[in-house]
Amino acid sequence: MGREFLEFVDVKSIKVDLAAVSLVPAVVAFKYNILPISLERKEAPGELTLALADIYTSLAAVDNIRLATRCRINLVQGNADDIWDALARIYPEH
């Protein structure tokens, strides 16, 4: 998690895993502009991939998500506006 450079992903082309979405409350996702992308459970407790635009403003939230889910966290970077648009689609009630 302490990496300065993250892999950049095109958030618009990613199919979001609803199992990953279920682990991150909408209020946290919107507040920190964090998009849960996938959850792989090859080994317990699993690996949760999150896309974020700014690691520095989101780091505390990422740590809280890791503690709450007990998952290993894989971080990727995405465009902030694209993440926000994806969040609006996957959390329509927010």
Image: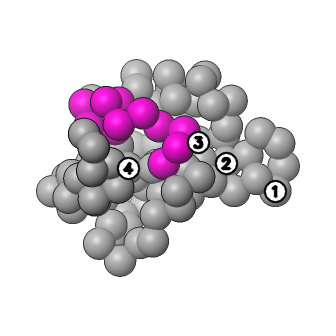
Label ID, residue 9? none
Please check the rendered image and state whether residue 70 is part of the magenta-colored stretch, yes or no.
no
Q: Are marks 3 and 1 in contact (CB under 8 Å)?
A: no
Measured along the vertical axis of the image, is residue 11 above or below residue 37? Answer: below
Residue 93 sits in quarter: top left
Measured along the vertical axis of the image, is residue 2 above or below residue 8? Answer: above
Give coordinates of residue 21: x percent, y percent: 48, 48
- Is residue 5 or residue 47 the one in the foreground? 47
Q: Residues within 10 Å of mark 4 (few under 14, many from 20)?
A: many
As measured in the structure, the alpha-carbon distance from the residue carrying label 1 to the one carrying label 4 is: 21 Å
- Residue farthest along the right direction in this orientation: 43
- Is residue 49 or residue 5 the one in the foreground? 49
Q: Is residue 52 visible?
A: no
Instruction: Identify the mark nearer the N-term, 3 or 1.
Output: 1
Please check the rendered image and state whether residue 30 is part of the magenta-colored stretch, yes or no.
yes
As measured in the structure, the alpha-carbon distance from the residue carrying label 3 to the one carrying label 4 is: 12 Å
Query: Which residue is tagged 2?
Result: 47
Query: Which residue is tagged 4?
Result: 35
Main secondary structure type of the part rendered in magenta: helix
Instruction: Identify the mark nearer the N-term, 1 or 4.
Output: 4
Instruction: Give the amino acid at mark 1.
Output: Lys
As measured in the structure, the alpha-carbon distance from the residue carrying label 4 to the one carrying label 2 is: 14 Å
Q: What element does badge 2 sit on?
A: strand
Q: Residue at x 27, y 50 (%)?
A: 92
Query: Which residue is tagged 1?
Result: 42
Query: Which residue is tagged 3?
Result: 73
Q: Are marks 3 and 2 in contact (CB under 8 Å)?
A: yes
- Residue farthest along the front direction in this orientation: 93
Span colored in magenta: 21-31
Q: What element does badge 3 sit on?
A: strand
Instruction: Identify the mark nearer the N-term, 3 or 4.
Output: 4
**Residue depth check, mark 3 versus mark 1: number of the one nearer the observer:** 1
